[in-house]
Image (tube, rainbow, N blue to C red):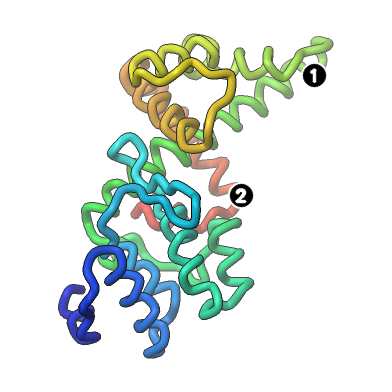
Amino acid sequence: MDKEIQQYNLTLTGNAAAIEFLKKAIADGKHWYIALLETIGLWKTAEETYNGRTYHYLIAGEAFDWLLLAERLCEEIGGLLPKEERITLLFHCKPPYDLTAKEFKELIGGSKYHQYLNYFYGITIEEALIQAVKYDVRKERQTLGHNTEQEIINEVYRRLYGSTKGILLKQFRRERSYPQLKSISLTELKEFTYWLFKYRLNHFDKAKIASDTNKALSILKDNNLPLRSLIG
């Protein structure tokens, strides 16, 4: 990859060089999605502030949110991309064509690929699992009379983690020395979800963990999420 950058005789460094590489690669005829993934492999920082928005690409120092970085890079090259392909990737998690896990890994690099797997299993899968159990609880309680959304959520978290969401969120924030606010940002929610994933791994037996993971994977499969193919 470094040799490919050098062919452009760039004088820039760091993320600026990566962005310039992306623009030039597309201008030279490379498919935008391939150039985008290669640029992700070149990216240097775990977070940045751009146009007044702070982007956190690495959750808890371990889980790489590559689609967030893809969104950021698309801001740089929006006029060079097919609008529908861009929307489909960023909002529906569907790339313009499928890559094998090996191809995806080679394009973004081994280190970022490992971090991507952390994100996939620790956040994407965990979110799918929570939604799957919420569906089960809501279905079970339809015939039992009135149940508030908060009661349903508490039951979901008790089944998955042995306690309510509120108690777990307070514990998470105490461990991270975060303020105990009434609201939660999207970045903190992702970090909390990743924390829940690790909490589940540390507090439950392997059979239950495997069963829960398969349940979540089935949900993603049923919803035809193509990015699952990138986990190998």
Residue 217, position in %: x, y?
49, 41
Q: Nearer the viewer, residue 25 or 51?
A: 51
Q: Which of 34 and 68 is in front in this view?
A: 68
Residue 142 got which mark?
Answer: 1
Q: In this view, does 26 lie above or below 134?
A: below
Q: Distance between the residues labelled 2 and 1?
A: 24 Å
Residue 207, position in %: x, y?
37, 23
- In the image, what residue type sits under mark 1? Gln
Secondary element at image label 2: loop
Question: Which residue corresponds to mark 2?
Answer: 223
Q: In this view, does 75 lie above or below 56?
A: below
Residue 177, position in %: x, y?
35, 18
**Crowd class of label 2 (few under 14; some 14 to 19; many from 20; radius 10 Å):** few
Residue 118 is left or right of residue 92, and the answer is left
**N-terminal of the two: label 2 or label 1?**
1
Residue 11 visible somewhere in the drawing: yes
Query: Residue at the spot x=36%, y=65% of the render?
Result: 100
**Crowd class of label 1 (few under 14; some 14 to 19; many from 20; radius 10 Å):** few
Query: Residue at the spot x=41%, y=18% of the render?
Result: 173
Query: Residue at the spot x=61%, y=49% of the render?
Result: 223
Dot 2 and dot 1 residues touching (CB under 8 Å): no
Quadrant of the frame with the N terminus:
bottom left
Secondary element at image label 1: helix
Query: Residue at the spot x=54%, y=11% of the render?
Result: 164
Quadrant of the frame with the C terminus:
bottom left
Q: Nearer the viewer, residue 9 or 155?
A: 9
Question: Based on the displayed image, in which of its 4 quarters is residue 107 positioned?
Answer: bottom left
Question: Based on the displayed image, in which of its 4 quarters is residue 200 positioned?
Answer: top left
- In the image, what residue type sits under mark 2? Asn
Residue 152 is left or right of residue 230, and the answer is right
